[in-house]
Image (tube, rainbow, N blue to C red):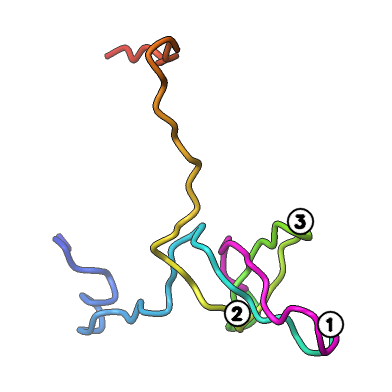
Amino acid sequence: MLGKRTPEDVLIGKKPEVSHLRIFGSVAYSHIPDKKCSKLDQTVEKAYLVGYSETSKAYRIYIPSSRKIVVRRDAKFMEDRAFREPREMPTEGQSVDVPLVQQ
């Protein structure tokens, strides 16, 4: 049994390095490459993390303004602002549709 140890910890004897992993859906600000913008254009875009590149050390991020997924290396993440849908509380006159859960 492994208990609370990872397979790498059991086989090699050291814990894996996971500091490079980010929260999926977190807000990211990505640097726009110089060749894609002029002198007075914005230099960053707001985006959301959707994955990691399989071919390079980069992130796959979704840019809502252009509705595209791009691979970029230069990004700053705001993990405390992970993407979530806003949930509003119903007022007194509104009914709440709650699905029935059968056990």
> Mark 2 to mark 3: distance in Å?
19 Å
Query: Label 3's element?
Result: loop
- The one nearer the camera, 95 or 97, is 95
| Above or below, 62 relative to 11 | above
Q: Amino acid at mark 1?
A: Lys
Name the image quarter holding residue 80: bottom left
Query: Residue 5 lies in what quarter of the image?
Result: bottom left
**Viewed as shown, does residue 81 lie left or right of 12?**
right
User: Magenta segment range?
Assistant: 38-53
Q: Are marks 2 and 3 in contact (CB under 8 Å)?
A: no
Task: Name the element at disc 1.
Answer: helix
Q: Which mark is residue 67?
A: 3
Q: Mark 1 or mark 3, which has the lower sequence index?
A: 1
Residue 103 among magenta residues? no
Which quarter of the rendering shows the N terminus?
Answer: bottom left
Q: Which mark is residue 58?
A: 2
Name the residue type under label 3: Arg
Asked whether the residues under the numbered discs 2 and 1 touch, taking CB atoms below 8 Å apart as contact, a structural biologist would say: no
Check disc 3: other Cα within 10 Å, few if <14, some if 14-19, many if 20+. Answer: few
* Disc nearer the start of the sequence (2/1): 1
Q: Quadrant of the C terminus?
A: top left
Whole-percent x, y for residue 63 in the image: 69, 62
Residue 39 painted magenta = yes
> Which residue has dot 1 on it?
36
**Mark 2 or 1, closer to the camera:** 1
Image spot of residue 60 (x, y percent): 63, 68
User: In the displayed structure, would residue 89 be above or below residue 32?
Assistant: above
Marks 1 and 3, how far apart in space?
A: 17 Å
In the rendered image, the vertical position of residue 97 relative to residue 32, given as above or below: above
The one nearer the camera, 61 or 16, is 61
In the rendered structure, which disc, 2 or 3, sits on the residue that comes first in sequence?
2
What residue sits 33% from the left and 81% below the top? Answer: 17
